Amino acid sequence: MSVQRTLVLCKPDAVQRGLVGRIISRFEEKGLKVVGMKMLSLDEELARRHYQEHVQKPFFPELVAFITSSPIVAMAIEGENAIEVVRGLMGVTDPQKAASGTIRGDFGLNLTKNLVHGSDCLSSAQHELLLFFSPEELHEYSLTLKAWM
């Protein structure tokens, strides 16, 4: 296993529904650590850069409109196989197909309002973290509970 960092976004619906704390808890309870976090409002330019692989897809305008509609919370999450673990905790993209016990399965409403984004692979994580965090905003520290996990 390798220690990885990944990006997690609590999308506008998570912020508006007051679910950010519960979402963060899911990651922390699993033993992952938050090494960077901030609330921000995405402008259209950053939204387009973040979702660049979807630019030609028919749902792109709706996606940009949604992600820029309200503040989000961006997090850098670190841990053993963090990318895979985070994606497992989030559940599949479509909340109606996501397993109970996952963030999307428990709280998600539809394909657009699915609460969270998580990087899908190491190269995406590295790219996405640079979009949302400067190196000074990411912190190195040890969890004292690491010995118990």
Image (cartoon, rainbow, N blue to C red):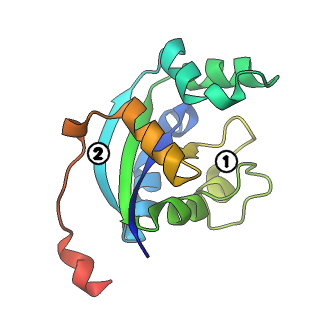
Closer to the chain start, of discs 2 and 1, is 2
Q: Secondary structure at mark 1?
A: loop
Left/right placement of residue 140 relative to residue 62 reads left
Q: Secondary structure at mark 2?
A: strand
- Mark number displayed over residue 36: 2
54 w.r.t. 138: above or below: above
Q: Which residue is mark 1?
A: 108
Residue 146 appears in which quarter of the rendering? bottom left
Type of amino acid under label 2: Gly
* Residue 18 visible: no
Q: Residue furthest front?
A: 123
Please provide percent x and percent y for residue 122. Answer: 50, 53
Q: Residue furthest top?
A: 44
Q: Residue furthest bottom?
A: 148
* Residue 104 visible: yes
Type of amino acid under label 1: Gly
Instruction: Give how far apart the Cα atoms at labels 2 and 1 are.
Output: 24 Å
